[in-house]
Amino acid sequence: MTTETESALPPGEVLAAARDFFLGADRMGDAWIDTESDTHITFCTFRGNLSIAAFADPEAAGATRVRVTTLREEGIVPRLLVHLALAGAGT
């Protein structure tokens, strides 16, 4: 299952916000990092793996395209997307 959205944040800040969502002091979900690069993070959760890719949107200057991919439906994905949207809005 892949969900795609855009963010006003640069790719590195999107990934930092995702890392904070799962690993920060006020985390909203439990996970650990499986793999990581400049454009993606793969987390392992209790239910399975969740990969987040963030890269410059080739169709919208200044925007970042964000893809969240899981092997099965994860209830945490909508909450992660809201967290990223709020981070991009500056709240």
Image (tube, rainbow, N blue to C red):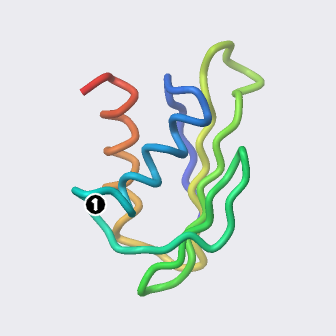
Whole-percent x, y for residue 89 in the image: 33, 23
**Side of 38 where 68 appears, left or right:** left
Whole-percent x, y for residue 14 in the image: 51, 39
Amino acid of disc 1:
Arg
Q: Residue at x 56, y 69 (%)?
A: 33
* Vertical comparison of 24 with 1: above or below: above
**Side of 7 where 26 appears, left or right:** left
Q: Residue at x 63, y 35 (%)?
A: 65
**Side of 4 where 23 appears, left or right:** left
* Vertical comparison of 58 with 45: above or below: above
**Side of 53 where 47 appears, left or right:** left
Whole-percent x, y for residue 36 in the image: 68, 60
Whole-percent x, y for residue 79 in the image: 31, 55
- Regarding mark 1 in the picture, which secondary structure is present there? loop
Task: Indicate the quadrant where residue 58 lies.
Answer: top right
Q: Split into 4 quadrants, where in the image is the N terminus?
A: bottom right
Q: Residues within 10 Å of mark 1 (few under 14, many from 20)?
A: few
Q: Split into 4 quadrants, where in the image is the C terminus?
A: top left
Q: Residue at x 71, y 28 (%)?
A: 56
Residue most toward the top? 61
Q: Residue at x 59, y 42 (%)?
A: 66
Q: Which residue is mark 1?
A: 27
Closer to the camera, 41 or 79?
Answer: 41
* Vertical comparison of 52 with 84: above or below: below
Task: Indicate the quadrant where residue 51 lies.
Answer: bottom right
